[in-house]
Amino acid sequence: MRTITVPFITRIKLTGLLQMARAGDGGIVKLAALQHVYEAIRFTEDEKPVLTMTDLGPPQGMEIRITDPASVAPESLAVTVSLEDEWVSWFSKTLDEWLPNATVVDLAWFEPLKSQLTAKKAEPKMEFKGRKQK
């Protein structure tokens, strides 16, 4: 299990990226994993009233903006989600496949996200609870 924080801008980018993801070599298993990620990061019905969403079609995807930036801080639209290891694996591979389409401005959201996905998990501490040796 991996817990990541996904800021507003990253959620916008991932919404479009995941909506256009293809099965490729992973087939239905890959799509199911990506659907779980999409459901975790997508904008909820409660959030949608403060957003303006416009479908620009391929290859641009969805344009999402805050309708009234003075009333909602982008930081309030960040989410922290827990993802199963298998989902993280397929998600990370999908991001790697998408990478050739990235631009310089994508680095601002891509690098922090990728580092969260690939960071080593903390190893559980081993503790000996036996008798002390003399």
Image (cartoon, helix red, strand yellow):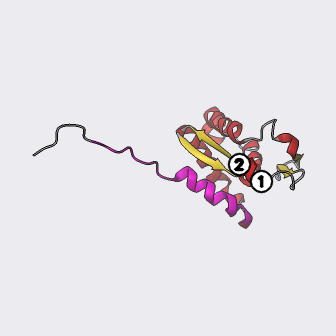
Give the residue pinned by disc 1. Answer: 74
Q: Is residue 94 left or right of residue 131?
A: right
Q: Secondary structure at mark 1?
A: helix
Q: Nearer the viewer, residue 12 or 132?
A: 132
Q: Which residues are magenta?
A: 105-127
Look at label 1 and name its amino acid: Pro
Q: Position of residue 67 (x, y in %)?
A: 90, 50
Give residue 78's mark: 2
Q: Is residue 126 magenta?
A: yes
Give residue 133's mark: none
Q: Which residue occupies 70% across, 42% down?
A: 41
Decide: marks 1, 2 in contact (CB < 8 A)? yes
- Name, please, the residue furthest toward the bottom: 104
Q: Which residue occupies 76% across, 42% down?
A: 19
Look at label 2 and name its amino acid: Ala
Q: Position of residue 59 (x, y in %)?
A: 82, 52
Q: Which residue occupies 58% across, 39% down?
A: 83
What is the spatial separation of the Cα atoms under label 1 and label 2, in whole angstroms? 7 Å
Q: Is residue 54 left or right of residue 3?
A: right
